């Protein structure tokens, strides 16, 4: 994920201080159904091997650490359903970067609505949002967020994408 063009562009915007100094980061993991319809297998629903924190959240945590630096967990709360074998249905965590910037993780599964997997970065002068993996938005304080144009050539493709590109052409 850190090599994806939208993340490379996000990192560029952060380094250019487009939104000023970073005040806070929200990480949002929302899944109306878990596992998702295309992920029906036993391990992804088990507490031991699966769950959205491990399956999805880890990619976002890795990306945050690559872009912003090390994370320290202050506290976390994970809620599991009464069935002791099932994975989490909710998570809340308060974390910090080394410079003290707060990161708030909120996750939920099994609700009415749309899936949302996103990170919102609040700065002193604006906001950047990476919505649903690769849709980058930005805006100045007091204004609406607008889409940020991202060019595919911004990053080196991860190895798997190189392999797929070779197979396809």
Image: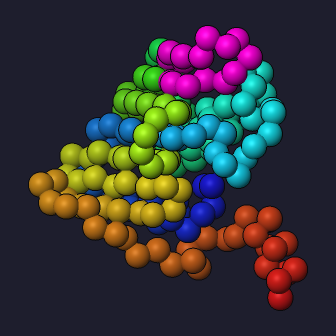
- Left or right: where does residue 38 sit relative to residue 62? right
Residue 5, image x and y in percent? 55, 68
Identify the residue at the far left of this view. Answer: 142
The residue sitting at 45% across, 63% down in the picture is 135
Q: Residue reaching furthest front?
A: 112
For the question of whether residue 101 can be seen, the reply is: yes
Residue 4 drawn above or below residue 28: below
Location of the N terminus by quadrant is bottom right
In this rendered view, identify the residue nearer to me: 154 or 144: 144
Figure disc tally: 0
Identified at 51% across, 24% down, the residue is 90
- Seen in the picture, residue 111 relative to 14 is either above or below; the reply is above
Residue bounds of the magenta highlight:
76-91
Magenta-span inclusion, residue 9: no
Q: Residue at x 81, y 33 (%)?
A: 42
Dominant SS in magenta? loop
Quarter of the picture containing the C terminus is bottom right
Farthest residue to the right: give it: 167
**Vertical position of residue 80 compared to residue 8: above or below:** above
Position above or below: 151 against 25: below
Q: Is residue 9 left or right of residue 83?
A: left
Residue 62 visible in image? no
> Closer to the camera, 18 or 79?
79
Is residue 77 covered in magenta? Answer: yes
Instruction: Give the residue at x 29% y 38%.
Output: 23
Residue 2 in the image, given as x and y percentages of width and height: 60, 55
Describe the colour scheme in one phrase: rainbow
Q: Position of residue 14 (x, y in %)?
A: 39, 55
Q: Percent position (x, y) of residue 167?
A: 87, 80
């Amino acid at each position: 994920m850190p090599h994806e063009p939208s993340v490379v562009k996000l990192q560029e915007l952060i380094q250019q201080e487009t939104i000023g100094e970073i005040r806070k980061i929200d990480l949002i993991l929302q899944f109306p159904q878990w596992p998702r319809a295309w992920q029906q297998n036993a391990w992804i629903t088990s507490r031991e091997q699966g769950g959205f924190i491990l399956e999805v959240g880890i990619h976002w945590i890795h990306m945050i650490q690559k872009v912003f630096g090390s994370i320290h967990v202050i506290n976390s709360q994970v809620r599991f359903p009464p069935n002791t074998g099932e994975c989490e249905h909710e998570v809340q965590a308060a974390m910090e970067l080394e410079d003290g910037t707060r990161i708030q993780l909120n996750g939920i599964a099994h609700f009415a609505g749309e899936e949302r997997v996103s990170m919102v970065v609040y700065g002193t002068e604006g906001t950047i949002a990476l919505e649903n993996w690769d849709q980058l938005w930005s805006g100045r304080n007091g204004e609406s967020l607008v889409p940020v144009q991202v060019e595919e050539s911004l990053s080196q493709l991860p190895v798997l994408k190189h392999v797929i590109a070779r197979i396809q052409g």
